[in-house]
Image (cartoon, grey):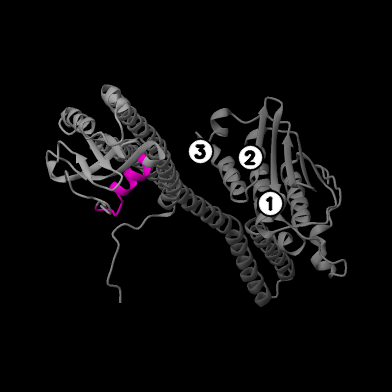
Amino acid sequence: MHFFRFPFRPNYGQKLTLLATLPLIVAVAAISLLVAHQSRLMAEREIKAMEEQLIEAKKAELKNYVTQARNGFYFIYGSASPNDDAAKEQVMQILSAMIYGEEGAFFVYDYDGNNLVSPRQTGLINNNWLGLKDSEGTPVVDELLDIARSGAGYHSYLWPKPSTGEEARMITYVTSFPSWRWAVGTGVFIDDVLASTAAARAEVEARVRRTFLYIGAITLTAVLVVFASGMFLNIRERRLADVKLKELNQRVFDAQEEERGRVARELHDGISQILVGVRYALDTAKRRLKQGDDRAGDTLDKGIGNLLGAIQEVRRISRDLRPAALDDLGLGPALKALTNDFANRTGIETEFNTVVFRNRLDQESKIALYRIAQEALTNIERHANATKVSVDIRGHRNGATMAIEDNGEGIPQDTARGDRPGGFGLRNMQERIEQLDGQLKIISSRDGTLIEVQLPLSHLLPPEDPSDPPTKTASRIFETTKTGAAS
């Protein structure tokens, strides 16, 4: 039991269109992902470089601040002894007054971890802050003291902003006053740098998303155009195919009716008249026998002759419908018999040539070549006014070729194109050979017409075993023959 039904069931052409668009979609998706990945990598490198440049600028600024501050009171520190409390107090007052911006200020720790100067956060003064860590677990005062003991350097950590009390990333530059055992430094919050890089990353992501949208829109448009074009061509080709199929069906019906009419006329005008004559001859002979007339025997002989004519007429009609030689002996003997009948019927000098070739033609090819030859000879008889005709068939490494040539008046262009009813025969030839993937060439001029049919190698069967019975191998043993009007 079916629970789901799909309203759209694509046909073969629509499936081909869908399969054609699938690689396009996959390729565009892969290109989009690659472009996005490369864009992110390049943008990340640029953002990292920008962040490093900004931080280096901040570090240079901090170092400059500390250098200027040290130069401002170095005349006091340089001449003071390690235990000069008055000099220390004077320097601490100078550093406490050196504030800048909204958050910037100097700090001083002694090597024991006690805070001596902190103008922005006075609650830190005179307290020991060894072991202080930020929310991420990074040591703060201990690391600053280690850097100061080694000379000078930078340290990054989270620290509450004096203006808001919220933690933010800070970079600090600290230096040492070794004779006083001080660590002096200043720091700057880099949240503006982080905000700039975050904004840059957000802009990159927005650009990548927009790029995806643009590529998706272009891809969707391209796929819709391809699909619509494929659907349009498919529908158009189906309509043309339907029209051609209707025309072909009509021609098949017309050909059937024409063949039936021809057979009916031949039965009525030929066999029927002969059988009527046989009947009258038998009736006459019967009466004469009753009367003892000696002419009864002559009448019976005449009836027997008419009956033999009827038998020959039946055989001729049967041969025209389906030649027995084509099935029993093969294409060569059948074409030979066809050209002999044509020569005897028309009085046109007819030449038939073939060569021995081992490979046999399949049944469809034999029938097609025979019908094409039959149609060509019929056209020559009706329209060409030719005096000489040649039929040649031979096999070769690329397949098989049959050529029919006459020295008649040629084929009019409109008839060759099928514009007139007379062109149906040529169209039938073309359709027959197209069914076999072959080629039909028609070269016509005032000096005659050449019809050449070529079949591909795929229609040649493998050679039979030499031990096959003669009845089977007779179809592949062709001899060069020549028949004329006198034969």
Residues at marks 2 and 3 touching, judged by CB atoms closer than 8 Å: no
Residue 30, x across and y down, in percent? 44, 45
Residue at (33% x, 31% y) in the render: 59
Residue at (31% x, 51% y) in the render: 138
Helix, strand or loop for disc 1: helix
Mark drawn on residue 370:
1
Q: Is residue 228 left or right of residue 435?
A: left
Task: Read off the magenta span.
Answer: 135-148
Question: Which amino acid type corresponds to the residue marked 1 in the rendered image?
Answer: Tyr
Local packing at callout 3 (Cα closer than 10 Å; few below 14, some 14-19, many 20+) is: few
Local packing at callout 1 (Cα closer than 10 Å; few below 14, some 14-19, many 20+) is: some
Q: Which residue is mark 2?
A: 379
Residue 130, x across and y down, in percent? 27, 52
Mark toward the viewer: 1 or 3: 1
Question: Which amino acid type corresponds to the residue marked 2 in the rendered image?
Answer: Asn
Query: Upstream in the sequence, badge 2 or badge 3?
Result: 2
User: Cα distance, mark 1 to mark 2?
Assistant: 14 Å
Work out whether residue 87 or residue 104 is closer to the camera in this orientation and state it. 87
Residues at marks 1 and 3 touching, judged by CB atoms closer than 8 Å: no
Residue at (44% x, 42% y) in the render: 34
Q: Is residue 225 left or right of residue 108?
A: right
Residues at marks 1 and 2 touching, judged by CB atoms closer than 8 Å: no
Question: Which amino acid type corresponds to the residue marked 3 in the rendered image?
Answer: Pro
Query: Upstream in the sequence, badge 1 or badge 3?
Result: 1
Mark drawn on residue 296:
none
Helix, strand or loop for disc 3: helix
Q: Which residue is mark 3?
A: 421
Helix, strand or loop for disc 2: helix
Work out whether residue 193 or residue 447 is closer to the camera in this orientation and state it. 193
